[in-house]
Amino acid sequence: MKFPKLGLGKLFRRKSSSDDDDFDDDFEDGDFGGDDFDDEDFDPDAPVGGSSDDTAPDAGEGDAGPDAGSDDTSPSDDLPAGDDIDGADGMPEGAAMDGDGETRPEGDGEAGGGGEDLEDVDFGDDDFGEDDFGDDDFEDEEEGGKPKFSRKKLIIVAAAVAGIGIIGGGAAWWFMGGDDGGSGGKAERQKPGVPFVEVNLPPKGGGGMLSPGGGGKGGSSLNTYATSEKGPGEGVAVAAVSAASFAALPKSSAENPLPDVPDAALIEQGQNGPLPKIGEKGRKSWQVYARPYDGNDARPKIAIIMSGLGLSQAATEAAIETLPGAISLAFNSYAQGNDAWVSRARQRGHEVLISLPMESNYFPLSDPGPQALLTALKPNENLSRLEFVLSRFAGYVGVLGSMGSRFTASEEHLKPVLDALNKRGLMYVDGGADKKSLAPKMATEINLPRAVADLTLDEVPSKAAIDKKLAELEKLARERSAVVAIAQAYPSTLERLATWAAGLEAKNISLVPVSALADKQILP
């Protein structure tokens, strides 16, 4: 039978450089080496056969067996044309013929009438030695003389393939979302510091689960709602920006509305829309549009700014309706319909600001948008962008710096912007993105009303984390007399702020709009 020369043993060991060297010694320029075989060593009329070195009978004259007087048994030039060791006279390639004329597979220790060099040529130590095809590789012949690969190695190969399949399948299942987020699931494998919170949204007719500390598996935060574990809609999550996420938040008590805006005397028409200006007798937007407060109140003061409004209808409406009027609202300059939102916010007693996008240290990975102020632009280009932002709507007391860690560190680029804000009668609130910001100090030098965010309340928007930040804010207020915090309209943030603000009177702390703290904070 035909048996391939390349055995599986080759797959289980590394090829050494000696393999190529020995092969070159046996095969030269595609021919058999002449030193291995001479004309006198081989009689083409002699039968091809013999046995191993241990059991070979006398070969007799002309035999090329081990007793023929030569250790080399390579075919010579006297071999009939077309005949060679492999495939001679129709004999299958890779097989030898024994003394009875029967074909048999090589590699079982019989050289087919040759010595060690014949083994080197066909199945020598360097090609198929004991490390490749030994007793463990071939067992007894099966019916028909076919060689049989050892069961031991078949089992090893099968086990390896099965193991790889199990590991690969498990990895694919995990990455493709193979669990349901339950016990031991993805929710428990979140990276440290990355919040993952949910609250169960009860089915129709179910009990309330939306209050902090409510029952159920979901937890106590309001950032994400998930449906019940049983029944229709099982496992469906409701995003925090949907109206359902804010449905259970309490409404703030009605307050005296602020006057309608804008004041025509404080508006001029710019290239992209209305721009604020200083009116007659020095009337300025930051004072005219401000929420009134009692300046004689000696209690520690806290101002809180809710930022990023206008992009989500549900979140914006919830912030306006849930938070007390003393909390200032900052609207995103890229949002649509801000005029209507500002009017509605002022009816609920909120003064408003507009966000001013600026370049951060992580730009362009963190992109503040197409109209952001950049250090790569010339001063007149940044002023043109500033006017675009200021013309988005009217009625704000000032601007809230958004991002800006790189821009506010450049005095060259920052000064023209602060000067322009001052000439338009606005105040500047530094978002606190970088403690190295030059804006507060430069604003003081040019008499631009300013405030600085001391804390961000909901970097981790969970109930416990927000409560901890609010406690820290109270401590700072007692130490510094006036502090400012910034937050976003997460459901959990709105709920915790509403609850916290209701208890401030008992703590002898005053909640004031941010305009009330203009130039009141002590700078480091």
Image (tube, rainbow, N blue to C red):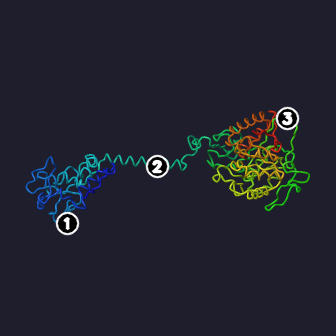
Instruction: State which tag comes first along the sequence, 3 or 2.
Output: 2
Q: State the mark number for residue 298.
A: 3
Q: Quadrant of the N terminus?
A: bottom left
Residue 366 is situated, as x and y percent measured from the top left of the image, at 65, 51
* Distance between the alpha carbons at the discs numbered 3 and 2: 67 Å
Of residues 496 and 18, the one nearer the viewer is 18
Residue 515 is situated, as x and y percent measured from the top left of the image, at 82, 45
Mark 3, secondary structure of its residue: loop
Q: Residues within 10 Å of mark 2 (few under 14, many from 20)?
A: few
Considering every residue shown, the one lying at the far front of the view is 412
Residue located beneath label 2 in the image:
168
* Left or right position of 340 against 140: right
* Distance between the alpha carbons at the discs numbered 1 and 3: 115 Å
Q: State the mark number for residue 523.
A: none
Q: Residues within 10 Å of mark 1 (few under 14, many from 20)?
A: few
* Distance between the alpha carbons at the discs numbered 1 and 2: 52 Å
Please name which of the two marks, 3 or 2, marks the residue nearer to the observer: 3
Mark 1, secondary structure of its residue: loop
Q: Amino acid at mark 1?
A: Gly
Residue drawn at 84 percent across, 60 percent down: 269
Please name which of the two marks, 1 or 3, marks the residue nearer to the observer: 3
Mark 2, secondary structure of its residue: helix
Q: State the mark number for residue 82.
A: 1
Residue 332 is situated, as x and y percent measured from the top left of the image, at 74, 53
Instruction: State which tag comes first along the sequence, 1 or 3.
Output: 1
Q: Are marks 3 and 2 in contact (CB under 8 Å)?
A: no
Q: Amino acid at mark 3?
A: Ala
Please name which of the two marks, 1 or 2, marks the residue nearer to the observer: 1
